[in-house]
Image (cartoon, rainbow, N blue to C red):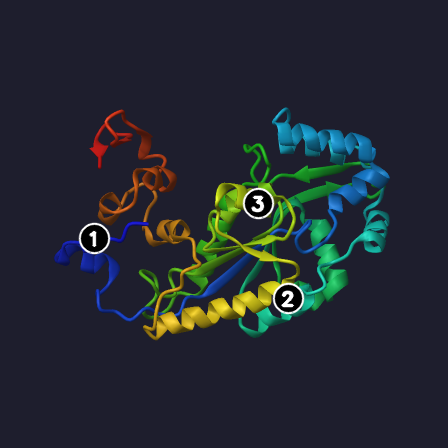
């Protein structure tokens, strides 16, 4: 990642604070997938296999999703439409077959002790996930976890399960990237105070994402630190494509590594070095005041590929002469 070129003093010092300002310790915000990450089984699979389309049809639909033959939202609607079980009865089955990660409860307590916001971000149904957490953690502790997922309408007799998609116009029904940005922005507004808002301090939180599958990748790209469950598809994809990640076998591993990251950030606050394990791209979009108005320092520093990654509406393609073409027809080195 090329280093930033020092900007002109009069304009850029106003925008980004004094160059001599001491970096502040960043807030940490955690986002985690649920099925296969917090729970070791998939809540939907348990329901569909026992009270819906059955394992054979469900497996065929999963294959169609992976091949691109059908969208996740389209195939999921068929699976949910096949359910014929009252909510409470369906949950009883899940309770008998579902296991949470053995280190999750302790990790949740750790997050509370350190005032670290923890968000579940899932393509599943919020009522199901909330009920699981209520039963496993207790309603009071469960209420401290924000669940960002699709809602649902379920008839009393259980003959109709209808997902209410968060983002209807998307192929997945839930744009996790959009949800993460909305939650980060909301959390930032809650924490605003003196000396916050821009630069390296409280206005630029350190985002952690925890997942297990390739479907988590779009959301994972928004994170500074990515944890991938060992031996599953997300880890394999990261290895194959050279994506930086931290492997975990349980949430106990995550807690231990997160404590190390917090220590690194503390050292950075004291001016004793910079953390090396973070994803620089994630930080860059959070530093910018607008994804539509490209800051001048961006023009001077990132690679052409990164400009297109971060500002696709502005940097749309690479020209034959090796320059990045903008949507307004101007070329930027």
Is 55 above or below relative to 13? Answer: above
Q: Which residue is mark 1?
A: 5
Front-most of 253 and 123? 253
Query: Residue 317, can we see it?
Result: yes
Q: Are marks 2 and 1 in contact (CB under 8 Å)?
A: no
Where is residue 198, by image quadrant?
A: bottom left
Residue 285: % across, % down: 37, 49
Where is residue 196, by image quadrant?
A: bottom left
Q: Secondary structure at mark 3?
A: helix
Category of crowding for the residue at label 3, using alpha-carbon neighbours closer than 10 angstroms: few (below 14), some (14–19), many (at least 20): many
Q: Which mark is residue 79?
A: none
**Residue at the image point whose x is 39% and y is 49% from the top:** 281
Category of crowding for the residue at label 1, using alpha-carbon neighbours closer than 10 angstroms: few (below 14), some (14–19), many (at least 20): few
Cα distance in 3D space between marks 2 and 1 = 41 Å
Residue 13 placement, left or right of 66: left
Q: Which residue is mark 2?
A: 252
Cα distance in 3D space between marks 3 and 1 = 34 Å
Residue 83 placement, left or right of 294: right
Category of crowding for the residue at label 2, using alpha-carbon neighbours closer than 10 angstroms: few (below 14), some (14–19), many (at least 20): some
Q: Quadrant of the C terminus?
A: top left
**First in residue order: circle 3 vs circle 2:** 3
Front-most of 158 and 302? 302
Residue 153 placement, left or right of 327: right
Residue 235: % across, % down: 58, 48
Q: Which residue is mark 3?
A: 216
Cα distance in 3D space between marks 3 and 2 = 21 Å
Where is residue 77, by image quadrant?
A: top right
Query: Residue 176, can we see it?
Result: no
């Amino acid at each position: 990642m090329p280093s930033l070129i020092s900007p002109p003093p009069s304009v850029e010092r106003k925008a980004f604070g004094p160059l001599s300002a001491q970096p502040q310790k960043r807030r940490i915000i955690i986002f985690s997938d649920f099925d296969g990450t917090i729970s070791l089984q998939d809540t939907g699979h348990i329901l569909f296999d026992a009270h819906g389309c059955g394992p054979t049809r469900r497996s065929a639909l999963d294959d169609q999703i992976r091949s691109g033959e059908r969208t996740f939202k389209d195939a999921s609607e068929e699976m949910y439409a096949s359910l014929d079980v009252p909510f409470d009865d369906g949950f009883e089955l899940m309770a008998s077959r579902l296991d949470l990660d053995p280190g999750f409860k302790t990790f949740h307590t750790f997050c509370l002790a350190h005032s670290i916001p923890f968000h579940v971000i899932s393509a599943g149904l919020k009522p199901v996930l909330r009920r699981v957490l209520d039963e496993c953690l207790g309603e009071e502790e469960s209420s401290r976890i924000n669940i960002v997922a699709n809602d649902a309408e379920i008839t009393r007799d259980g003959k109709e399960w209808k997902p209410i998609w968060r983002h209807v116009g998307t192929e997945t029904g839930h744009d996790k990237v959009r949800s993460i940005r909305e939650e980060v922005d909301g959390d930032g507004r809650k924490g605003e105070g003196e000396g916050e808002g821009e630069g390296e301090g409280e206005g630029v939180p350190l985002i952690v994402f925890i997942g297990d599958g390739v479907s988590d990748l779009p959301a994972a790209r928004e994170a500074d630190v990515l944890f991938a469950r060992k031996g599953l598809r997300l880890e394999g994809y990261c290895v194959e494509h050279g994506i930086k990640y931290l492997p975990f076998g349980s949430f106990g591993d995550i807690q231990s590594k997160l404590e190390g990251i917090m220590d690194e950030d503390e050292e950075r606050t004291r001016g004793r070095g910079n953390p090396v394990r973070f994803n620089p791209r994630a930080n860059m979009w959070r530093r910018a005041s607008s994804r539509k108005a490209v800051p001048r320092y961006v023009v001077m520093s990132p690679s052409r590929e990164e400009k297109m990654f971060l500002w696709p509406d502005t940097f749309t393609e690479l020209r034959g002469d090796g320059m990045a073409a903008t949507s307004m027809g101007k070329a930027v080195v």
